Amino acid sequence: MAKIVAGFVVLSIYSALTFYLGWGIKQWLVAMNWFHYPIFYWLILYIVSFGIIIGRLHESLRVFSVIGNYWMFIFEYGLLLCLTVQLVMWLTPFHNIRIIGSLAVAIFFILWIFGSYFAYSPVVRHLNIVMDQKDSELSSMRVVVASDFHLGVLSNKKHLQRFVKLSNEAEPDVVFLAGDIVDDDPKWFVQEGMAEVMKQLTATYGVYGVLGNHEYYGKKIAEFVEEMKKAGVKILRDETIRVNNAFIITGQEDKTNKERKHLEALKLSDQLPWFVMNHTPDDLTTPARTGVDLHMSGHTHKGQLWPNHYITARVFELDYGYKLKGQMHTLVSSGFGFWGPPMRIGSRSELWVVDITFQ
């Protein structure tokens, strides 16, 4: 009963905010003499606003999912700009809705253009760290770290090709994919033949990945793992493996899996550099205390759209970038892809190239 009440409250607030946004847009359209057919206007607005839900009802309604993803951007920045316009008109002598509204619309489309560019034009971040060599046969190595591809309809095969190109140009010793590789269902990965692209990744010691929360949302874990195997990616599910006499890799299940093992149970006794992938960086204290050398995560997207990063910064000890916690090197990526709208404001699609020197 409590969940039903909470769901009703959330739905009511969302519907009210959608109405406020629609009302704000209507005011500008009326001022521009462009507002016609009010019933049609409000019907289209609410259909679009619930596009993600509609798109999940049947495969033939897939286009509504795409529209719904774009709506997230329209909703967030539409509300911010509507509110800004209202404040300007209340607090300043400027009351010309045609001019102020047109300026807001222009800003919106500028954000749309830049947001799309930041999402589809990934950058390479470089990091140099020094780590205890222990008994490793290596004196140095290069690691590529990426997460949150959300491969599917909008984060597509072409975007994956960008990653493969950038990763191979770095000539890594190992590639780590820290979860949310597909966007819920791996069917788009299969239908678009993305495995053929992914298997072009080159790395001396291989390509490894872990599950994220979205792989669990898709509820096709076995199919996903098998597709990754075909693509040359070994998915580690609460597993620890020893790679030659070089290093140890642990891949933790995502916290979505309430039955996942504790990290202490996955530790080996070998004295080699220990790399751990855990999609959600919700606990950095345990791996630092357990002796992890490099801990890699994603999940946060650095908020993806400004000002959401203020929220992720409050939720996570480290929501983005690099941090040395005790003796543990910690890295959280904003992701190579995106969730929802194919836009980024205040963040970039990225991969990390980490050069490790052992001593």
Image (spheres, rainbow, N blue to C red):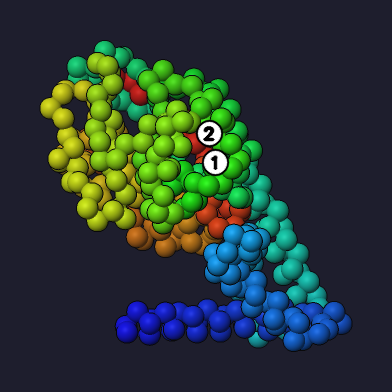
| Nearest the eye: 207 or 93 | 207
| Residue 286 makes an appearance in the image | no
Q: Looking at the picture, which amino acid does disc 2 mark?
A: Ala
Count neighbours of disc 2 (C-alpha within 10 A) and say few if under 14, some if 14 to 19, many if 20 or more.
Answer: many
Three-letter code, disc 1: Val
Question: On residue 190, which mark appears?
Answer: 1
Dot 1, crowdedness within 10 Å: few (<14), some or many (≥20)? some
Give the distance between the C-alpha atoms of the residues marked 2 and 1, in whole angstroms. Answer: 7 Å
Where does the N terminus fall, quadrant-wise? bottom left
Q: Position of residue 34 (x, y in %)?
A: 85, 79
Q: Give coordinates of residue 214: x percent, y percent.
A: 43, 53
Dot 2: what SS? helix
Residue under the point 38% across and 47% down: 221
Residue drawn at (57%, 64%) of the image = 58
Is residue 222 in view? yes
Q: Is residue 260 above or below residue 242?
A: below
**Looking at the image, residue 321 lies above or below residue 6:** above
